[in-house]
Amino acid sequence: QVELLESGGGLVQAGGSLRLSCVASTHTFSPYTMGWFRESPGKEREFVARITWSGSTTHYADSVKGRFTISRDGAKNTAYLQMNSLKPEDTAVYYCRAGLGGHEYWGQGTQVTVSS
């Protein structure tokens, strides 16, 4: 069982930045692929970014490429999402996901609101 706790959301003006954090309560953080997803009212949850267990490979949704950066710190059992040049359409609840084999775990989400 892995518990994930996100933080770092908030209200920011368009063009601003936020950094989300996701702390995993597990002693075996390293093997997990970590990802960020988001969900806005009236839309399905969508993929934002993911990073492999080694941190050597990352993938991003086209809508955030060049603006968002995912990273991880194994020593802190933490994954991050640095979000720059935020747009109003980035407004959503952001969820952290940990995946390994057929198992996946989700955090409770953190609200990001970007004002125009």
Image (cartoon, grey):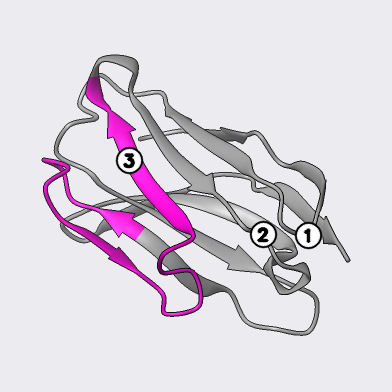
Q: Which residue is mark 3?
A: 71
Helix, strand or loop at mark 3: strand
Alpha carbon distance from label 1 to label 3: 23 Å
Helix, strand or loop at mark 1: loop
> Crowdedness of circle 2 by 10 Å Cα count: few (<14), some, many (20+)?
many
Q: Which residue is mark 1?
A: 14
- Give the amino acid at mark 2: Leu
Q: Point out the tag, 2 or 3, that comes first from the N-terminus.
A: 3
> Image height check: is 50 above or below 88?
above
Front residue of 58/30: it is 58
Q: Is residue 15 magenta?
A: no
32 with respect to 18 (left or right): left
Task: Please state which of the two labelled residues, at mark 1 or mark 3, is closer to the viewer.
Answer: 1
> Image height check: is 66 above or below 22?
below
Question: Which residue in the rendered view is the most extreme toward the top?
Answer: 75
Q: Position of residue 99 (x, y in %)?
A: 28, 53
Helix, strand or loop at mark 2: loop
Front residue of 46/67: it is 67
Q: Which residues are magenta?
A: 50-74
Front residue of 78/31: it is 78
- Give the amino acid at mark 1: Ala
Which residue does the image show at 56% across and 39% down from the upper left? 20
Q: Are marks 1 and 3 in contact (CB under 8 Å)?
A: no
Q: Position of residue 43 (x, y in %)?
A: 70, 83
106 with respect to 87 (left or right): left
106 with respect to 56 (left or right): right
Answer with the quarter of the image where residue 66 lies: bottom left
> Crowdedness of circle 1 by 10 Å Cα count: few (<14), some, many (20+)?
some
> Image height check: is 106 above or below 27?
below
Is any part of residue 19 visible from this angle?
yes
Q: Are marks 2 and 1 in contact (CB under 8 Å)?
A: yes
Q: Which residue is mark 2?
A: 86
